[in-house]
Image (spheres, rainbow, N blue to C red):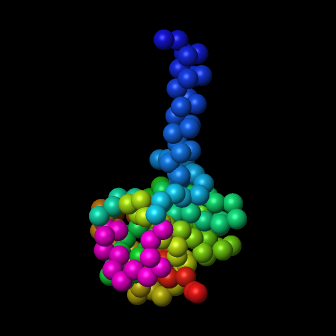
Amino acid sequence: MTLRWIRWTLAPMALAGALACGGPVGPLAGGRLSGEVGPPRVADWSFANDHETAQVEVRPEDPYSVNTWCAAIGPRLYVPTSMILGPLNPTERQWVAGVEANPELRIRIAGVVYERRAVKVEDEAEFAVARAALEAKYEIAPEDREPDRIIWIYRLDERSS
């Protein structure tokens, strides 16, 4: 097997597989999320805590999706910007710019896509509870926090009819 064979045979196959999955692959962003569309109302998101990652899709006119974290607290689902890796400022993330331009997004958890509206958590008490839930789920110790990192947390609410 030559390097040329690998490059011209396996690379296109890997790319085709990545594109067929309907979303991001690892750290690489993707496009429109595929999957069954879930109900518009979810009374209890606790099932989301059983999943390490979710995929968020922004920009409905030109879908852009990324892998992300999420944490559920009863009827509320939260998605943070960046808690440990990547840019220190959320405004430097493409998916965050997409949310800020248009808060209607889609999130895929365990193959099911939910259409939601992102609301930036501004209330300090709600932010603290959501951050604690995220840090507990992903085992982020207080000493692991970067003092210069700005973290935004979005609550994913039902879309308005």
Q: Residue at x 58, y 52 (%)?
A: 30
The number of numbered discs placed on residues in the rendered structure image is: 0
Residue 45 part of the magenta segment: yes
Whether residue 93 is visible: no
In this rendering, the answer to whether 48 lies above or below 27 is: below
Q: Nearer the viewer, residue 16 or 152?
A: 16
Residue 109 coordinates in the image, percent (x, y): 41, 63
Query: Principal SS element in the magenta part?
Result: loop
Residue 63 coordinates in the image, percent (x, y): 64, 60
Q: Residue at x 48, y 11 (%)?
A: 1
Q: Residue at x 54, y 58 (%)?
A: 33
**Residue range (magenta):** 37-49
In this rendering, the answer to whether 129 lies above or below 112 is: below
- The quadrant of the picture occupied by the C terminus is bottom right
Residue 43 part of the magenta segment: yes
On the rendered structure, is 127 left or right of 101?
A: left
Q: Residue furthest top?
A: 1
Whether residue 16 is visible: yes
On the rendered structure, is 49 left or right of 147?
A: left
Residue 157 coordinates in the image, percent (x, y): 49, 81
Residue 135 coordinates in the image, percent (x, y): 34, 68
Q: Residue at x 61, y 76 (%)?
A: 103
Please tell me in which quadrant of the rendered image residue 59 appears: bottom right
Q: Nearer the viewer, residue 85 or 137?
A: 137
In this rendering, the answer to whether 66 lies above or below 58 is: above
Please tell me in which quadrant of the rendered image residue 101 appears: bottom right
